[in-house]
Amino acid sequence: MSLELLDVIHTRAQAFEALKRIAARHGRPLNPDALVRLTHRADKKRRERCIELCEALIDLLAASFGASGAEIRSPLRGRQEVSRIRQIGMYVAHTSLGMAMNEVALGFARDRTTVMHACHTVEDLRDDLEFDALVSLFEKIVSSAFTAWRMAA
């Protein structure tokens, strides 16, 4: 792809226009419907994978902290202890698993700003050595548990 095309691609629409130009240069028609289906299929797989990953993480949170998985998954804020456990899960999903905040939000069925708040809160609470040790231990558990998961991706 030429530099002129790389310099102008900032949106999906611009990427689509660049693909049309490349296809025209090679004398091949571009089927927009097939491209849209392919994009939707990839988006759907990504969403499903985010949800599946967060579901497994929530199960691990429940087992590690002795909380109910149903409470952690609840759309309600719930008890402070459960809310804090959920925040730790969101933080670890973002920092240790490398998920984008919108992906974590999708997986935890929350708003992206809620995930941002959770990450900031946990980061601030890590100044407490006991809390930091707890989060560090959970990060190690998650890192071990999800190594095979990442390799399969």
Image (cartoon, grey):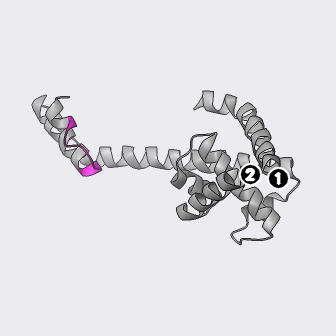
Residue 97 shows in the view:
yes
Q: Nearer the viewer, residue 33 or 56?
A: 56
Q: Residue at x 61, y 27 (%)?
A: 151
Q: Residue 95, image x and y in percent?
A: 61, 43
Q: CA distance from mark 2 to mark 1?
A: 6 Å
Q: Residue at x 81, y 45 (%)?
A: 134
Neighbor class of circle 2 (other Cα within 10 Å; few <14, some 14-19, many 20+) is: many
Say what amino acid the circle numbered 2 marks.
Ile
Quadrant containing the N terminus is top left
The question of residue 114 being in magenta is answered with: no
Say what amino acid the circle numbered 1 marks.
Ala
Q: Residue 69, image x and y in percent?
A: 80, 57
The residue pinned by badge 2 equals 58
Q: What numbered label is drawn on residue 62?
A: 1
Q: Residue 141, image x and y in percent?
A: 78, 37
Q: Residue 61, image x and y in percent?
A: 78, 50
Q: Nearer the viewer, residue 118 or 111?
A: 118
The question of residue 8 being in magenta is answered with: yes
Q: Nearer the viewer, residue 123 or 144?
A: 123
CB under 8 Å between discs 2 and 1: yes
Q: What numbered label is drawn on residue 107?
A: none
Q: Which structural element holds mark 1?
A: helix
In magenta, the rendered stretch is 6-13
Neighbor class of circle 1 (other Cα within 10 Å; few <14, some 14-19, many 20+) is: many
Q: Which structural element holds mark 2?
A: helix
**Residue 49 found in image quarter:** top right
Please state if 119 lies on the left or on the right of 62 as rendered.
Answer: left
Q: Residue at x 33, y 49 (%)?
A: 36
